[in-house]
């Protein structure tokens, strides 16, 4: 570029068209070159940053609910996003097709008890009713029993770990979307905290949470995040999920 500008300056001088002093023109040429180099450097940094893929899991509790979960599945399918759904046993009746759809479209399903009770300090019989009965119901729908467990309220004790029969999945980002149900606040809470390996907790039973989830996905996609199921995220981070172990996130 500098050679071109010097040739141009010489041509103007020979033609009697050079009005500015040659030193000023050369300074302008150098400045243009510097600005061009800086712009190219910024573009290189941006390209490098965009290429640094970040992985995250978005999870949904307390469903399925036909009026909201179906809409969410439509939005996730449109965006090519895989999520993890922790299901309530009492919510399965009448929504069997939604659970089968989750499995067919690459989502992961897990257990969130029969009726959303605290699992700590339960008898063996009550624990089996809350967890193992739901495992059997979901297995009948999706064709396998390799299901993750999310205890309601995130409450875990040694008994829960011992009897879980599954890896126990908690979370690292919780916007408490069940509270004021403020969509803008939920989106800001999640997006301002999201980092590689995080697990996001939301609930697919609220229309506001579905709206917030779609906006979160779009914004984090824009930032270069790729959404995986919990098990996919663990594999990406080379973590072997073990029954009875508790996982909040999978930092890189």
Image: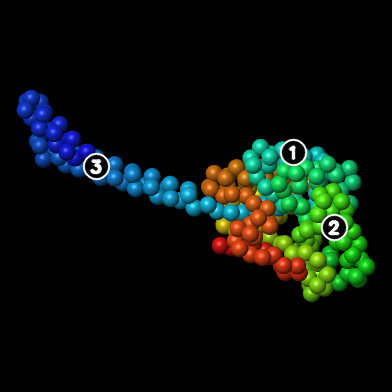
Dot placed on the residue nearer the N-terminal end, 3 or 1: 3
**Is 155 placed above or below 67 here?**
below
Q: CA distance from mark 3 to mark 1?
A: 52 Å
Q: Quadrant of the C terminus?
A: bottom right
Q: In the rendering, at what x and y percent does residue 82 appear? A: 67, 47
Dot placed on the residue nearer the N-terminal end, 3 or 2: 3
Q: In the rendering, at what x and y percent does residue 187 appear? A: 63, 48
Q: Residue at x 63, y 64 (%)?
A: 239
Q: How many marks?
A: 3
Q: Residue at x 83, y 41 (%)?
A: 97
Q: Which residue is mark 3?
A: 33
Mark 2 surroundings: few (<14), some (14-19) or many (≥20) residues within 10 A: many
**Is 194 placed above or below 205 here?**
below
Q: Which residue is mark 1?
A: 71
Residue 72 left/right relative to 96: left
Would you identify the image quadrant in which residue 150 lies?
bottom right
Report whether residue 13 is seen. Answer: yes
Q: Residue at x 90, y 59 (%)?
A: 133
Mark 1 surroundings: few (<14), some (14-19) or many (≥20) residues within 10 A: some
Report whether residue 193 is seen. Answer: no
Q: In the rendering, at what x and y percent does residue 144 appear? A: 81, 54
The answer to whether marks 3 and 2 mark residues whose Cβ atoms lie closer than 8 Å is no
Residue 3 left/right relative to 165: left
Q: CA distance from mark 1 to mark 2?
A: 25 Å
Tag 1, which secondary structure? helix
Q: Residue at x 11, y 40 (%)?
A: 23
Tag 2, which secondary structure? helix
Badge number at residue 135: 2
Tag 3, which secondary structure? helix
Q: For this rendering, which residue is in front, 167 or 41?
A: 167
Going by the picture, which residue comes out furthest to the front? 143
């Amino acid at each position: 570029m500098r050679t071109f500008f010097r040739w141009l300056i010489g041509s103007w001088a020979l033609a009697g068209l050079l009005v500015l002093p040659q030193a000023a023109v050369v300074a302008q040429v150098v400045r243009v070159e510097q600005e061009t180099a800086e712009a190219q450097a910024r573009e290189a940094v941006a390209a490098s940053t965009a290429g640094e893929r970040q992985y995250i899991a978005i999870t949904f509790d307390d469903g399925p609910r036909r009026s909201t979960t179906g809409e969410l599945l439509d939005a996730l399918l449109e965006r090519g996003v895989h999520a993890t759904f922790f299901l309530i046993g009492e919510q399965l009746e009448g929504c069997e097709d939604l659970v089968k759809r989750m499995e067919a479209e690459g989502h992961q399903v897990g257990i969130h008890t029969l009726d959303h009770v605290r699992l700590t300090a339960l008898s063996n019989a009550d624990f089996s009713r809350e967890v193992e009965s739901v495992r059997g119901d979901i297995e009948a729908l999706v064709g396998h029993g390799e299901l993750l467990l999310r205890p309601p309220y995130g409450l875990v004790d040694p008994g829960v770990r011992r009897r879980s029969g599954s890896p126990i999945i908690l979370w690292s980002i919780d916007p408490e979307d069940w509270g004021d149900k403020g969509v803008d606040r939920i989106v800001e809470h999640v997006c301002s905290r999201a980092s590689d390996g995080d697990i996001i907790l939301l609930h697919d039973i609220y229309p506001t949470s579905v709206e917030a989830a779609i906006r979160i996905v779009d914004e984090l996609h824009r930032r270069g995040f790729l959404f995986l199921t919990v098990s996919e995220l663990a594999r990406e981070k080379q973590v072997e999920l073990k029954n009875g172990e508790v996982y909040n996130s999978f930092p890189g």
